[in-house]
Structures are given as structure tokens and as C-alpha cells.
Image: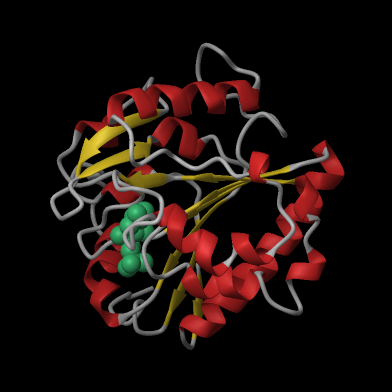
Amino acid sequence: MEVYPDPSAVARAAAELVVDLCAEAVDATGRFLIALSGGNTPRGLYERLAGPGYAERIPWESVHVFWGDERCVPPFDPQSDYGMAKEVLLDHVEIAEGRIHRIRGEDDPELVAGEYERLLRRTFGAMTGPPPTVPGARFDLVLLGMGEDGHTASLFPGTSAVQELHRWVMPVEAPADPRRRVSLTPPVLNASAHTLFMVTGAEKAPALAAVLEGPRDPLVYPSQAIEDAEWFVDADAASLLTA
Ligand code: 6PG
């Protein structure tokens, strides 16, 4: 885990990691498969990636963008995770529409979940069975945030998606609006070559301490269902950690 002074330093460090992992993946497989997270925290990272010092360091023609979850709202709804990334990043870099794989929040969640899983399976070359764990046949990087209740993606406390072992994408019910969401599940998230949590703000400190230092109970703290993740946090979020 890396603790940074403030959210801007977290965004800068995350941007450097994206550049490095992208270069590594493109060198090894010719493409970079990244799953973006939603919410507010990654906004600073996406803005940085679209700007000078970073945009020109990323071979956008080799990047394929996916999402770890999506709210069931139209793409241009202010609550759309795709809409936010499009506004601050995707509209500002040379990435082909065909490489932007949004979760269709405007359609029926069950159908969308099945469609997105088939897309991921085609992308990874694994039409059946668990996600492969070989380069190019899994995400190269999954970005995740964490809610104050310890949720991540749209894996919320007490929901079956937290313990899903087979489906890669599921419709889920969130405790807060928008309640209907579609989320990737631990099997496909944990198969990723790299997983990065970005957590900032004092309001996240209790959950971060519970997730990282408390007893393991992913149904209570779903971020604990994610294995081997890197954590980039700011001092406020880390303020209750003992280690
Ligand atoms: C979403 C995200 C969600 C988010 C956390 C933290 O679609 O909202 O996938 O898991 O990362 O809720 O959100 P903030 O970054 O806004 O605190």
C-alpha cells in the first residue's frame, strides 16, 4: 500500500502506473486491457491521463477500455460511470469508438450482464470456464474504488455477487440510487494481472482500516473479496490504519 499526501498525489502516482503497465502489456501482447472504475475518486486520474505529460505517453490505438461496473442509467446521465470517463478522458484522446466497451446502462440489466460477459469471454478467448490467468487473456489492469461501506465496483455488503464463483458479470441491487447496476464479479476481477484501489478522504478511513486490518469477511466488506490488490490512498483515508 502507498500513502500519498493528498488526492492529487494519488492521481499522479496512478497515472504513472497506468503508463508503465500499458507499456508492459503492449510490449508483451500488443494491447492494453483496462477496466475503469466509477464514482468521483478516479476523476483526477482520468483528467491527468488526458493531459500533457501523460496522454502522449500512452499508445491509445492499442488500448481497450472496459468498466468494472455501471449504473443502470443512460450513457449521458450524470450518474453514468461511462459518461464521466467520456467527458474527462475518452473525448480527449485518440481512442477508436470500437475500443471503448461501455456497459449499456440503458438496457435490461440481466441481458446487459450476459452480453458483457460474452464480450469479455471473446476478448479473453475463454468462451467457457474460469477467466484465464495468462497475459492478454485477462485484464492487464482493473481500477477500483471503495465506498464508505467497504463496497467496490457494485459489489455491496450482503449481496450474492460478492460470493459469485462462476458468472463474470451480474445485475445487482445497490442500497443507494441508482439502485439497479451491473457489476463484474470477483472471479474476473481477481484474474486481472494488476488491480489498483484508489481511496481518498477521511470519510473512507473507518472502512479502509476494517478492510485492510480487520477480520476477513467479504460479505460485510466486499473490497476484501479482491485479492492481491495494490492500494494508493491519501493520508486522510489512511488516518485510522495502525500499520
Ligand atoms: C461506482 C464505483 C464504486 C465507487 C465507490 C467509491 O460506480 O460508483 O464503481 O464502487 O468506486 O462507490 O466512490 P467515490 O470514488 O465516489 O467515493
- Say whether residue 212 is visible: no
In this rendering, would 118 be left or right of 220? right
Residue in the picture at 34% in, 57% down: 77
Q: Nearest the camera: 189 or 80?
A: 80
Q: Position of residue 130 (x, y in %)?
A: 50, 19
Quadrant including the C terminus: bottom left
Q: In which quarter of the image is residue 159?
A: top left
Residue in the picture at 53% in, 59% down: 86
Tell me if residue 187 comes above or below residue 68 in the rendering.
above
Q: Where is residue 154 in the image (x, y as percent from the top left)?
A: 30, 46
Residue in the picture at 33% in, 33% down: 107
Q: Which residue lies furthest to the top in this view?
A: 128
Tell me if residue 11 comes above or below residue 58 in the rendering.
below
Q: Position of residue 141 (x, y in %)?
A: 60, 49
Q: Quadrant of residue 238?
A: bottom left
Tell me if residue 210 comes above or below residue 204 in the rendering.
above
